[in-house]
């Protein structure tokens, strides 16, 4: 059990290190792609709900 805890701690530290070093750029890119994909459908959804209300 202690080995597992240590492994989790190590992985957590690595993950935090990744986020602090190079992850934000990748995360921002993923978010912008996600927004590009979702924003048209979101606006379509709002237009659709406005039409029916």
Image (cartoon, rainbow, N blue to C red):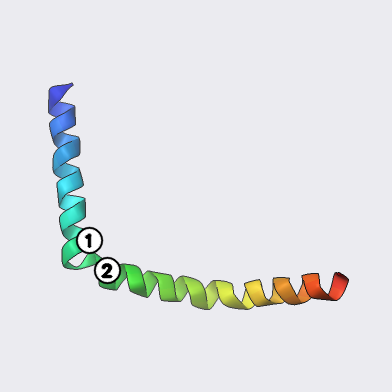
Residue at image position (21%, 52%) is 15
Residue at image position (62%, 78%) is 40
Query: x, y percentage for residue 49?
Result: 79, 70
Disc 1: CA contacts within 10 A as few (<14), some (14-19) or many (>=20): some
Quarter occupied by residue 16 = bottom left
Q: Nearer the viewer, residue 6 or 53?
A: 53
Disc 2: CA contacts within 10 A as few (<14), some (14-19) or many (>=20): few
Q: Give the alpha-carbon distance from disc 1 to disc 2, as whole Å.
A: 6 Å
Disc on res. 24 = 2
Query: x, y percentage for residue 34?
Result: 48, 70
Is 14 situated above or below 50? above
Query: x, y percentage for residue 47?
Result: 75, 77
- Identify the secondary structure beneath mark 1: helix
Query: x, y percentage for residue 17?
Result: 15, 57
Quadrant into which the N terminus falls: top left
Disc on the earlier residue, 1 or 2: 1
Residue at image position (35%, 74%) is 29
Residue projecting furthest to the right: 52
- Identify the secondary structure beneath mark 2: helix
Q: Nearer the viewer, residue 43 or 26?
A: 43
Residue at image position (86%, 69%) is 53
Residue at which label 1 appears: 19
Residue projecting furthest to the top: 1
Q: Is residue 37 left or right of residue 42?
A: left
Quarter occupied by residue 22 = bottom left
Q: Is residue 29 left or right of residue 45?
A: left
Q: Are marks 1 and 2 in contact (CB under 8 Å)?
A: yes
Quarter occupied by residue 7 = top left
């Amino acid at each position: 059990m202690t080995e597992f805890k240590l492994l989790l701690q190590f992985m957590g530290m690595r993950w935090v290190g990744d986020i602090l070093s190079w992850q934000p750029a990748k995360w921002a890119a993923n978010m912008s792609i996600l927004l590009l994909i979702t924003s048209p459908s979101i606006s379509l959804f709002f237009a659709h709900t406005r039409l029916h209300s």
